[in-house]
Amino acid sequence: MSERPAVSASSRLRALLRHNETGLLGILVLITLIAAVAVPSFSSSGNPTEILDNASLVVIVAVGEYLVIVTRQIDLSTAATLGLSAYLIGELVGGLHVGVLGPVVGIVASLGLGAVLGLFNGLLVERVKMPAIIATLATLSIYSGLQVVATHGSQLYADQLPSWLANIVSESWIGLSPLVWAAVAVTVVVALVGRRTSWGRDLYAMGSNPEAARYLGIRTSRRTYQVFAACGALAGFAGLLYAGQYGNVDATAGNGFELTAIAAAVIGGVSLFGGSGTAFGAALGGLLLTEIENILALLKISIFAQQTLQGAAIVVAVAGYALISRRLDRPTRRQLGTAEDRGDSSAQAGSVPSAAQELRA
Amino acid sequence: MSRWRSLRRWESGLIALLAVVTVVGGITHPALLGIYNLQTMALNNADLALLAIGVAPVIITADIDISIASMLALCGVLMAKLWTDGMDIWLAIAVAIALGAVLGLINGLFVVLLELPALAVTLGTMGAYTGVAFLILGGQAIINLPQSLVTLGSGNIGGTQIPISLVVVLALAAALAFVIHLTSYGRSLFAVGANRQAALFSGIPVVRVRLLAFVIAGVFSALAAVLYVGNYDTAQATIASDQLLPAITAVILGGVSAYGGTGTIPGVVLAVVLLAVLQAALGLAGLSGQAQTIAVGAILIIAIGAGAGINAFTGLRRPRRRAAVSEQLGSG
Amino acid sequence: MKVLRNWRLLGTASAALVVAAVATLLTVGGATARIAHRASGTTLFMLPKFTGIPPFTQADQGAAKVAKAYGYTLKYGGPTTGSATQQVNFINNAAAAGDKGLFISADNPAAVSPALNRARAHGMKVVSFDSDVEPNARTVYVEGTSAASIAQTELNMLGSQIHYRGSFVILSAQATDSNQVLWNNVLKQDLKKDKKYKNMKLLAIVNPPNDGTPAAVQYTQSIIQKYPTMKGIIAPTTVAVAAAAQVVKQQHLCSKYVVTGLGDPQQMKPYVTSGCVKQFALWNFAREGEVAMCTMHYVLIGKVTGKEGQTYSCPDGLGKFKVGPQGTVKAGNAEVFSKKNLKAFTF
């Protein structure tokens, strides 16, 4: 959503209703209500917090992915960054005895490692001029190879972790685990940076029209380095949390995560064609994916039927909130005299946020 | 015109790289060019090649389909199941190919008619199609398939050392290349991928063009299933799930822009061959799995980096940039 | 113009770099491979489901030790993730490189078998270990321990902790894992046949959609939500049993549910030390590797052809072995681990 910075209160309300996230949130609430009524064990103690716990890592990586995708790039290497960081930083903090400084060292080191790996992606894209999808496919290969090299056929064991890390799921801060709070914090910070700062607006401008962004004097290459570093840093941070959440980290940690995180962002309304989407949307996308998985696992049906329904549910949910968003969107469009033309997406690029446009990816 | 020149250049780059890998690999490890290695390489990459060229049209129209491997599994499972239930294998193959078309059409209808993001839709159908394959077979595998299918997937042409599947793949690739590069449908495909809006204004049936691309991906996944099941003599719900990323890699390495509007079928075929020879050469050199993974990544970077450098030298920007820019200018 | 010249330079330089990189990789790799060949006449290849996890590393170490004694060169390698098509690449490469014997733990038994038969026609002997291939695609299968002993051990570990009374769930691996399917079927038959287990009830066999830790964690959580009155979980995979223990520990439910199954001793140590897991079992992977290598030796010299009843003895006190039905050799017994013997044990 490339919303213009200056808006009045009433148009802000309208903008809120138009928000893609409204539709997504609606679907999420709807699914939750249905599940609460229809699936007895859904609202049983522990389950709702489990969904949040399980969604946290996807949310963090998806929010990082949002920064990259909004500039019309992509990062497929996050899974390997996560896995590499989970092992290396897990081992680092496990071997350190710095008392209360442990969490600080862990967080800084995981962000740092991820940022370096992400920066390398940025270098390939910006300096070597590789398409991001190939560059990060290549680094996905390289980083996951390094993951096997680093773990050298062994693994990180749960008892090697310091207690502050090992307890990020079992502890409770005001009802939620530290893991969930970390995801909330990341989402809020990135959302604020993305929508309320000129840095964030630069990213939308780049994604909507890279050439124009350059003519406007935006330092596009610097921004590209920065978003890849930020995305890598968040994947690295998620790696640290992975170690805490699952205890055991071997060379397969993070496998298959790359598509989940990108899918979460896209389901949350971040367009692969750049220039639209929000961090909240990406986070809600991750939450939706996790909740669908959770509900189906609670049904007493075969795992095979679960898998089928899960796939179908993703499609239905995406279709459902797209329809809701478009309905909310319609009056505004009429007001602006914009034709609702199917085949067109880019006409409104950078001007009017349109659900149809955001969804086309 | 310039697009064509830049693409030919991309393919020349791939050929040059292939030559380097083949020559260096062949000298250090003569077994690379031995008949056994060439045969097994062809057999083991036939299904990958069909998956890759089949999804290329979808990516050329600036969509994506990540359900291709699942369609392969579902079509393969249905084909084998029908055969065990007594159907003639050739009829079962025909049904599987028809199913591929239907699955592709389902993807297309959601993406094109409901205007949903292709990645999200095909992520959903990827899970759903695999799930249906599981519902049909559970965790079981069907093996010992009829000799005619096994021969098609793994046998040689009578009296020669040439695998049948190699010829099948080349024939199908030639047919698809004809459709994509020499027919009016092909021209519409590129036009839609380069600038959907302009294509619409110039009277191209954008919806139909995009739908047909998804159907092609489905049909080629089903064709890949026929070769896969024949070659591995196995039909199971999880087969080929490890082929998704390699297939997409081959398409992009083959010069198809991830943002649509450019690419050629011969380029994708070359990329499949290059990746196969590279893997075999590294494997014969005794590199461990992780070293191979790292090496393939590094060579991708160096190769594409060189390609980008050469393209830039000739004054032609990367195809991707060009498409993206023209889309923006066209819409501005 | 200057820019263009720079690009041309960059292009040429990168092209040169590609040639150099490929050449170095291939020749360096080749040189080491050739030295290996010179050191010994016969090279063997061990191909696990995927590399990078402790059990396969242990099997490799065991096999390498015995290979040295026999004078073979053992190469170890495989995909970095579970992938049948990539395993086939490794099979093809080993055969093309002229390796004389292949050890394989199959990711997908059916799918790798045609490639194995092509490799055998090319002159390679095949011994499967850990996870069998189709019987017609190998000479011998060396199993860590028998399915019967795994099922018995699992039922007894759980039964002894719940007084052989109550319901339980099996948290398994992917539905396509042929080992798991076999073990779980034997366990179900034992439950029916043996009076000892008549008050134990299997509620469900849960197969997560993949073999990763996050999926196993999530399915443990859903098992607990769905079957709150169960007494315990049997998880016959090292990934799942550790994941189940992790969840039960995080939710402070150690005293409510028994978690047991097949686990890696080092991985399970923290859960056993804290008392959350009382017992689990595993066979010795290093020993399985040793026996596999010894068996391969007899296969290579033609003494073992996979016929039932053939016997042979292995060095280093491994003992005597006998080929059972369908060319299967049992390498050892499952060992039960608890607080008592875990400290003394190091693989």
Image: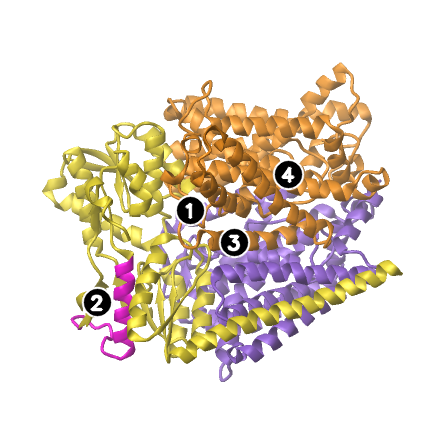
* Marks 3 and 4 on same chain: yes
Q: Nearer the viewer, mark 1 or mark 4?
A: 4
For marks 3 and 4, the one nearer the N-term is 3
User: Residue B304, percent across and down?
Assistant: 69, 60
Please state which amino acid type lies under the numbered disc 3: Leu
Q: Which residue is label 1 attached to?
A: C210
Instruction: Say which colour chain B has.
Output: purple
Q: Is residue A246 visible?
A: yes
Q: Which residue is label 3 attached to?
A: A146
Q: Marks 4/2: CA distance?
A: 55 Å
- Residue C269's place in the image compared with B152, above or below, is above
SS for callout 3: helix
Q: Residue at x 68, y 65 (%)?
A: B267
Q: Residues within 10 Å of mark 3 (few under 14, many from 20)?
A: many
Quadrant of residue B314 within the rendered picture: bottom right
Tell whether B85 sits left or right of A271. Answer: left
Please state which amino acid type lies under the numbered disc 4: Ala
Please state which amino acid type lies under the numbered disc 2: Asp
Please say whether residue A168 is one of the residues in the magenta stretch. no
- Proximity of marks 2 and 3: CB atoms separated by less than 8 Å: no
Nearer the observer, C328 or B198? C328
Tell whether A194 sits left or right of A236. Answer: right
Q: Which residue is label 2 attached to?
A: C316
SS for callout 1: loop
- Proximity of marks 3 and 4: CB atoms separated by less than 8 Å: no
Q: Which mark is residue A230?
A: 4
Please say whether residue C309 is one of the residues in the magenta stretch. yes
| Chain given the colour orange | A
The magenta span reads C286-311
Looking at the image, the residue that sits furthest to the bottom is B159
* Marks 2 and 3 on same chain: no
* Marks 1 and 3 on same chain: no
